[in-house]
Structure formats: structure tokens, C-alpha cells
Image: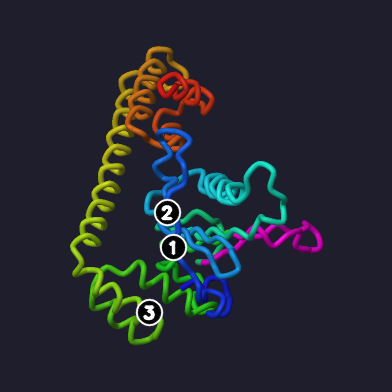
Amino acid sequence: MLVAILNIEESELKELKIINNELPRQFQEDKKGILDVRAKTKDEKEINIEIQVLATKYMAERTTFYWAKMYTNQIKSGDTYDKLKKCITINIVDFECIPLDKIHTSYHITEDETGYKLTDIFEIHYLELAKLENKNIDKDENLAITQWMEFIGLKSKEDMEMLAEKNEDIRKAYDLLQVMSKDEKSRMAYEAREAEIHDQMTRIKTAREEGINIGIDKGINIGIDKGANDKAIKIAEKMIKRGDSMEDIVDITELPENKIIELRNKYLH
């Protein structure tokens, strides 16, 4: 999959290895900072592959933030800049977040007019699974990437087997999944992850319904009426305590971000 996404030779990944899959959390709500896969190539390039199933309003900002953490964590005080190696972030998301008619987009730092690449250390990819259903998007531009995205998004064993017949690399991945599915620890980890996703979606739905009820009771926007604003603050406090993300709290309460930061500092310090 990495060969297809990064357009590189397989030999570059011969010494690919999984390293620590968790970044230090800065705040309580940084649950989404957990990386699904963190890897290095034989020439020390770092790769962060993250699968995100819940829509996030500030996806670009969040991605850049965690890319920066991965990049700056490579050196310590007194080290020279030549120790910094290229960092690549690959986001596989189950929602649309880029307003372009492409299922795979990639980004670098380039000069505005000439397209000259300032440095090769920055590289971010988005693979948007939701766009696979869009008939207006050319999915044959890079068939290998499309097939990997379809494989990730498939639910039935029969569909997986059909796709595995078309792509030898996907066949290897499918065979490995068959082995893993029989391993109790792997199955328990998958079920725990699914439960956490369902719990988080339920918390967001409940908080959103509470916010709607506040608006109905007051008949005006949350941010204008003082009484409603007090209730919005209480909802924000509750969401902070249980670890909801900044974007979810802003979306539900409609409070300004600086107010949520103030509340977060109050409860987390």
C-alpha cells in the first residue's frame, strides 16, 4: 500500500518497522492523537499512517500539528538540524475533507508561482474513502491506490476475496488478515477500538441533542442569551471532563475557542 501511495520502489521499505504508535498527549481531549501506524524506512524517513472514521472540522490544522510533533521530536537540545529526516503523514479518512474531485491528494511546501519545492521534508497525503461512491471522480488515475482504498472500506468477506483476486499485494494482506482474525488478542483489540468509536459517536450525539434543546428552550442562539450561554458552558465543561475534542466542543456549544481553552485550563491544571 505504501509503495502505491508514495510512488516509491519496494526496496526502500525492506527494513520497514513499526515503532512507538503513540504520541505524548498534550491535553486530555487529545484522544485522537493516537497514531494507528508509525513506521520508519531504511533511510530513517518517518511515516505516520492514521485511519480516522469520525469527521473532524479542523483536519488540516490537526494533521499539520501532529506532523510537526513527529518532525521536531527527532532531535534533542544540542542536536544539529542535519539529524532531521523526512516525515510523511498519510490520512485515511472515512469522510470528505478536501474540496477537490480526487480521492487521493498529496501536499508539499512549494513556491507559489514556480512550484519550486523548498524542501522535501514535508509530505502529507489524504485518502478519502467516502469519495469512492462519487461517480464524477476518476478512480482509475491510480488504480492501485483505488483498490487499496476499496479494500480498506469493504465490509464483506466475499467482496474482499473478489478484490484480492485482482491485486496480488492485496491478496497477501487479505491472507494475513485471515490469520489475524483467528488470533484472540487481535480480535479483542479490534472490538475494543470499535466500542470506543461507538461510545464517542454516542457522546457527540447526546451533546448535540442537549445543545439543540437549549436553543429550543430559549428560542435564540446559544451565544447571545446569557442563560443559554451558561448552559453551553456547563455542556462544554462536561465534554472537557470526558475528553471530547476541541472541534467537537466548538461544534456542539458554539462557544468561541478561547473560552473553551480557558475552561480546559481550569479543569486540567
Residue position for label 1: 18
Marks 3 and 2, the one that precedes in the sequence: 2
Rendered location of residue 45, percent (x, y): 59, 63
Residue 126 vertical position relative to residue 9 in the rendered view, above or below: above
Give the camera-side residue of 86 and 219.
86
- Asked if labels 2 and 1 touch by Cβ distance under 8 angstroms, the answer is yes
Model colouring: rainbow
Tag 3 secondary structure? helix
Residue position for label 3: 170
Tag 2 secondary structure? loop
Rendered location of residue 256, percent (x, y): 51, 26
Instruction: Give the residue drawn at x 31%, y 77%.
Output: 174
- Give how far apart the Cα atoms at labels 1 and 2 are: 8 Å
Residue 265 vertical position relative to residue 117 in the rendered view, above or below: above
Residue 129 at least partly seen? yes
Instruction: Give the residue drawn at x 48%, y 44%.
Output: 57
Specify start and end residues of the magenta stretch as a single range. 104-123
- Give how far apart the Cα atoms at labels 3 and 2 are: 23 Å
Residue position for label 2: 21
Circle on res. 44: none
Instruction: Give the residue drawn at x 25%, y 69%.
Output: 180
Q: Main secondary structure of the magenta part?
A: strand
Q: Residues within 10 Å of mark 2 (few under 14, many from 20)?
A: some
Rendered location of residue 244, percent (x, y): 37, 35
Q: Is residue 118 magenta?
A: yes
Rendered location of residue 94, percent (x, y): 40, 58
Q: Residues within 10 Å of mark 3 (few under 14, many from 20)?
A: many
Q: Residue furthest right?
A: 114
- The residue under label 2 is which amino acid type? Asn
Relative horizontal placement of residue 206, taking residue 245 as reference (left or right): left
Front tag of 1 and 3:
1
- Give how far apart the Cα atoms at labels 1 and 3 are: 20 Å
